[in-house]
Image: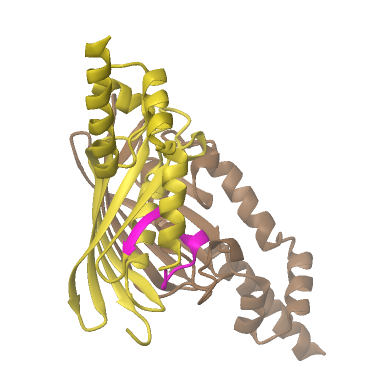
Chain colours: A brown, B yellow
Amino acid sequence: MARGNKNKKQRHQDLLKIIEENPFLTDEKLAENFKVSIQTIRLDRLELGIAELRERTRTMAQDAYSDLKSIDQQELIGDLLSIDLGKRAISILQTTDQMIFQKNQIVRGHYIFGQANSLAVAVIDARTALTKEAHVKYLKPVYEGERLVAVADVIEQSGDKFTVEVKTTSEGKTVFQGKFTVVVIGEV
Amino acid sequence: MARGNKNKKQRHQDLLKIIEENPFLTDEKLAENFKVSIQTIRLDRLELGIAELRERTRTMAQDAYSDLKSIDQQELIGDLLSIDLGKRAISILQTTDQMIFQKNQIVRGHYIFGQANSLAVAVIDARTALTKEAHVKYLKPVYEGERLVAVADVIEQSGDKFTVEVKTTSEGKTVFQGKFTVVVIGEV
């Protein structure tokens, strides 16, 4: 029992740390990591006052959306998680059975492109921005149900032209990467 | 009156020719070309037994869909107009207000990408094909209501890897072009 309590205390500390570093881990993943049951993780979260994944995502998204400038909230494909205008933006896309090829259950390319492309436009610190060019690579097939985390980084600016790199991962593995040239229309 | 009849006969001949060459011209465009009213074009079509644009598109699409192999009909973005498996495919996408940025009425990039990408997969003569890489350029903004004609040409094959070039036009002007690398999974 004493040992059980020590384990639990340690797990609580680790849990707080791991969720702070990666707020997008599911209870299933956390249970796997800690080699405990999902029920245990749920109880841990309750005791620690950590919201469930959906709620964590929603809260972060609400904070982030108010900073959007070049794109409307509903025009973003995926949920915005954080944005530092002109620098970096992160979104998450929950893939569904609406997005797949019936034949092989693989998520169709334009959804993954759409998440990355809309994020590349969103990160630009201007009222109106449009994609001029994109070079994208699909590195790993994505299946229904995977949660895609896209990170867009502005890596270059030359006048009204921006280069944005987007990397999309699923459970830590890169599934897609793209380089987008985005141009600002009107004032920067 | 004699002159009027001669003009009409000539116009009918020209109309038959122009619609055979480009079945996707609207009555508005045809009226503009012939410098007559839209009503005159409609009467001409009736007399000549030429179906209206929507019907012409639909008939061509039905013929083409039966040849699809790597993609299901509802998975194609746009309407398929013709396909020569392994060589060339053509589709048309009627843009709507569902596809635009509210702010500037410009059609969002992933719809144009989606039409091209799904056509690049559709043209491959195999049961299963996936996009590995794409390099795309947006050359001209597309506004709500424009009809996009995409033509996909297989320009190279190396083993199970195909290079497909897609060019998308609106009223004859190129608005988008892309080079897609498509890979066949399993048998070619």
* Towards the viewer: A67 or B164: B164
* Towards the viewer: A30 or B83: B83
Side (left or right) of B148 relative to A112: left
Residues in magenta?
Answer: B68-83
Which residue is painted at 31% across and 27% down in the image? B29
Question: How far across and down, in percent of the image, does residue B81 sit?
Answer: 37, 53
* Towards the viewer: A89 or B187: B187
Side (left or right) of A35 relative to B83: right
Question: How far across and down, in percent of the image, does residue A21 sit?
Answer: 52, 65
Which residue is painted at 36% across and 78% down in the image? B126
Side (left or right) of A52 relative to B1: right
Q: How many marks?
A: 0
Which residue is painted at 66% across and 62% down in the image? A53
Say which quadrant the N terminus of chain B sits in: top left
Vertical position of residue A154 compared to residue A149: above or below: above
Say which quadrant the C terminus of chain B sits in: bottom left
